[in-house]
């Protein structure tokens, strides 16, 4: 037989800890004996309250509940166990002589995972309990894996944060050194000046990447709250266009801002950075001498901004990926991705817009330019926006 057709063997469930709750001693002994011969550790309870106490104290792998018990019936015990996070994932099997449809529906509404009928069939109870224990063990394994994954992610984030934070100071010093050197332009020939300017621009880009990484980490950890004040989104867009004017002039690009005032409760600083990122991205990929159009609008208490360039465009398969932090792609596509990605800037934009309760996206095709857009709720303003 071809190896590709072979199925991996299923892991055998280990014996588990089983709680058997029944007010009749013969039933507890019968069920307990069947399960103990299968290797399970059996814990018993003779009424509903005792069943709850034992369940919370021992956290068994499966629970068998009789319906008719003193103090609390099996349905109520099931409801309380399923409502508590400590016991919600434990499989509960209702054991009852009742066979009516109403009782089964009541059990399912209470959260029961399975039913066993009295009189007890030994083989049936062995199989159903084995399956319930196996399901619980698989669930526990997944939870352990998730907890370990969260620990590793936290360690990675902390390490990244420390490294990035330590990079900021030396990069700022290097960038400042380039600026000092470039003040004496007459000492260098054009080729040297070009190399110095390239070095300075790379430092500035790295500093912005460091800033974005730190801000992304703060946003993901809820440490960068949104501070809303009445403001005009068009005014923020105009300020952002003025902030990138030096870059746009180098490529002889125009950045007309048009549309409505689009007033709302906004975090001016964060949205300014979002628009600077989007405009910087557009400048980077726009041909010299073209225009980058910024349009602002509002409708039904939703504000919208579009930043349209006439650049190379982005293939549809990359539209989602470019907004992800450390997006994973096929290594063969890495070179292509770098042509369309603006680094961490778009990941910051996505988090910032979503922190406002909004959405962000792109409309683009190869050779047809790109239109990055975002929408945010306006909220209500109590004072005129600037």
Image: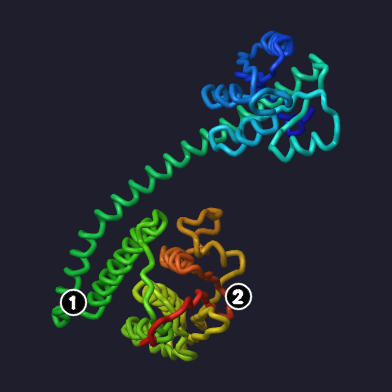
Q: The N terminus appears in which quarter of the rendering?
A: top right
For image coordinates 56% across by 64% down, the residue present is: 320
* Mark 1 closeness class: few <14, some 14–19, many ≥20 residues within 10 Å: some
Q: Secondary structure at mark 1?
A: helix
Q: Is residue 142 left or right of residue 195?
A: right
Residue 80 in percent (x, y) is at 61, 35
Q: Is residue 209 left or right of residue 373?
A: left
Measure the alpha-carbon separation of dots 2 and 1. 39 Å
x, y (%) of residue 68?
73, 24
Q: Which residue is mark 2?
A: 365
Q: Which residue sits at x=50%, y=64%? A: 323
Residue 214 placement, left or right of 335: left
Q: Is residue 251 visible?
A: no
Based on the displayed image, in which of its 4 quarters is residue 175 positioned? bottom left
**Which quadrant is the C terminus positioned in?**
bottom left
User: Sequence-wise, which precedes: disc 2 or disc 1?
Assistant: 1
Closer to the camera in the image, 332 or 141: 141
Q: Relative to 162, does residue 338 appear above or below in the rendering? A: below
Q: Which numbered tag is attached to residue 182?
A: 1
């Amino acid at each position: 037989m071809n190896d590709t057709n072979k199925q991996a063997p299923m892991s055998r469930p280990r014996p588990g800890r089983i709680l058997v709750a029944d007010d009749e001693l013969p039933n507890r002994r019968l069920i307990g004996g069947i399960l103990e011969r299968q290797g399970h550790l059996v814990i018993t309870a003779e009424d509903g309250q005792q069943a709850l106490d034992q369940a919370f104290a021992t956290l068994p792998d499966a629970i068998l509940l009789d319906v008719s018990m003193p103090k609390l019936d099996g349905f109520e015990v099931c409801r309380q166990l399923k409502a508590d996070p400590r016991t919600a994932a434990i499989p509960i099997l209702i054991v009852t002589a009742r066979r009516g449809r109403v009782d089964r529906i009541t059990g399912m509404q209470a959260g029961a995972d399975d039913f066993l009928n009295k009189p007890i069939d030994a083989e049936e109870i062995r199989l159903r309990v084995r399956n319930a224990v196996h399901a619980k063990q698989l669930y526990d394994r997944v939870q352990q894996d998730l907890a370990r994954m969260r620990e590793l992610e936290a360690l990675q984030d902390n390490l990244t944060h420390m490294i990035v934070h330590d990079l900021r100071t030396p990069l700022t010093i290097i960038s400042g050194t380039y600026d000092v050197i470039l003040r004496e332009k007459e000492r260098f020939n054009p080729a040297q000046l070009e190399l110095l300017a390239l070095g300075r621009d790379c430092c500035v880009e790295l500093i912005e990447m460091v800033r974005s990484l730190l801000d992304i980490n703060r946003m993901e950890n809820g440490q960068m709250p949104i501070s809303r004040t009445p403001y005009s989104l068009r005014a923020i867009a105009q300020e952002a266009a003025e902030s990138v004017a030096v870059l746009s002039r180098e490529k002889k690009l125009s950045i007309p801002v048009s549309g409505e005032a689009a007033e709302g409760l906004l975090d001016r600083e964060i949205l300014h950075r979002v628009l600077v990122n989007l405009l910087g991205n557009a400048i980077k990929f726009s041909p010299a001498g073209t225009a980058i159009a910024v349009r602002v609008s509002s409708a039904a208490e939703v504000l919208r901004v579009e930043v349209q360039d006439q650049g190379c465009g982005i293939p549809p398969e990359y539209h989602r990926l470019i907004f992800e932090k450390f997006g994973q792609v096929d290594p063969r596509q890495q070179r292509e991705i770098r042509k369309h990605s603006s680094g961490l800037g778009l990941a910051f934009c996505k988090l910032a817009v979503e922190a406002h309760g909004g959405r962000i996206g792109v409309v683009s095709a190869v050779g047809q330019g790109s239109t990055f857009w975002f929408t945010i709720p306006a909220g209500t303003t109590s004072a005129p926006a600037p």
